[in-house]
């Protein structure tokens, strides 16, 4: 029988690890400051900051902040008692950086994400979100779908990018989530040259920047830097591979690991080294 987490224990869970466990990563990292698109409301510019040192968050767009309990209530639209029951589903009441394994288990309990149906990507709200990221809509419709899903008892819709195992990466102005099974995606065109992206928004950004290259390359989307080991054998098979990963610590480590294990790989991220990722760079070209 799992032991119920109390408020004090819940407050000790790393907010950064908590967000990561439900598929939400930072847009930028500056020292202890991790900047995100708000996980509970729609926005185009990251104004949600987590202070890793203090384990607290503040949403500059709404001028409010707090601890993990305050955040969990907003994300899951529940009260304190319900949130503690969700967190207690696995008994993962551990502290800080040592909580990665526990939070992975918590994610299985709290996510409760079920795909309801998929259809052509034509919803005006989703298309508007893509336009705000300057994504070519024709490319987006080709590789993505509108996905309706149930998340913790509420129904949402999002842009869905399907992995090779059938799970979806889901993006909207509200959520950044994944359905199970999470996996990489390899798109083949019979090319001996490969482009590697960390996420599908970067993949779509690359196609938006260079639409004529679509059939000239194969494409590998990691969907998380945690899948680098799955990607290395695939990358090694190509004559040349260009890496377009994020510029945060995880992205740089993944790039270094691939370069160390694949003599055919080239870090192609130098031209956006001052930005968070390729999409961030692409958007900046229109500002």
Image (spheres, rainbow, N blue to C red):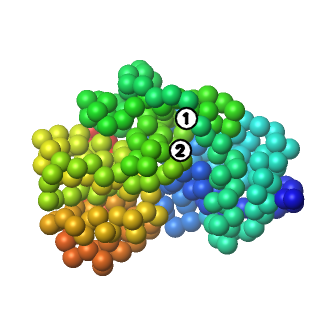
Q: Residue 246: which quarter of the image?
A: bottom left
Q: Position of residue 91 (x, y in %)?
A: 79, 60
Inspect this view and state whether residue 287 appears: no
* Farthest-out residue, front: 165
Mark 1 vs mark 2: which is more N-terminal?
Answer: 1
Could you tell whether 189 is left or right of 221 in the image? left
According to the image, label 1 marks what residue? 115
The answer to whether residue 281 is left or right of residue 29 is left
The residue at the point 81 percent across, 39 percent down is 79
Task: Say which residue appears at 21% left-offset and 58% top-offset.
Answer: 194
The picture places residue 2, in percent across and down from the top left corner, at 84, 59
* Residue 179, disc: 2
Q: Disc 1 and disc 2: Cα gap in Å?
A: 7 Å
Badges 1 and 2: C-beta atoms under 8 Å apart?
A: yes
Instruction: Tell me if residue 171 can be seen.
Output: yes
Which quadrant of the rendered structure holds the N terminus? bottom right
Q: Position of residue 222 (x, y in %)?
A: 38, 56
| The quadrant where residue 286 appears | top left
Residue 132 placement, left or right of 27? left
Q: Is residue 271 above or below residue 120?
A: below
Neighbor class of circle 1 (other Cα within 10 Å; few <14, some 14-19, many 20+) is some
* 107 displayed left or right of 35: right
Foreground residue, 240 or 16? 240
- Disc assigned to residue 56: none
* Residue 270, picture quadrant: bottom left
């Amino acid at each position: 029988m799992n032991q119920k987490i109390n408020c004090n224990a819940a407050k000790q869970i790393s907010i950064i690890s908590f967000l990561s466990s439900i598929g939400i990563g930072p847009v930028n990292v500056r020292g202890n400051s991790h900047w995100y698109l708000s996980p509970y409301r729609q926005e185009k510019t990251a104004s949600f900051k987590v202070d890793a040192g203090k384990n607290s968050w503040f949403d500059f767009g709404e001028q409010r902040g707090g601890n993990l309990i305050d955040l969990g209530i907003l994300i899951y639209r529940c009260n304190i008692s319900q949130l503690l029951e969700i967190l207690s589903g696995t008994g993962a009441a551990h502290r800080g950086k040592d909580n990665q394994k526990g939070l992975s288990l918590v994610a299985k309990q709290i996510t409760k994400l079920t795909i309801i149906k998929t259809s052509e990507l034509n919803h005006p709200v989703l298309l508007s979100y893509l336009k705000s990221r300057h994504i070519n809509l024709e490319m987006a419709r080709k590789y993505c779908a509108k996905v309706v899903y149930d998340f913790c008892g509420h129904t949402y819709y999002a842009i869905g990018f399907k992995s090779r195992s059938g799970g979806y990466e889901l993006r909207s102005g509200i959520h950044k989530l994944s359905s199970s099974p999470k996996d990489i995606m390899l798109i083949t065109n019979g090319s001996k040259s490969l482009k590697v992206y960390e996420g599908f928004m970067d993949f779509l950004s690359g196609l938006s920047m260079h639409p004529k290259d679509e059939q000239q390359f194969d494409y590998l989307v990691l969907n998380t830097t945690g899948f680098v080991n799955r990607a290395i054998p695939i990358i090694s098979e190509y004559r040349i591979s260009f890496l377009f990963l994020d510029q945060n610590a995880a992205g740089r480590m993944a790039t270094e690991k691939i370069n160390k294990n694949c003599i055919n790989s080239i870090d192609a991220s130098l031209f956006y080294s001052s930005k968070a990722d390729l999409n961030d760079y692409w958007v900046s070209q229109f500002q």
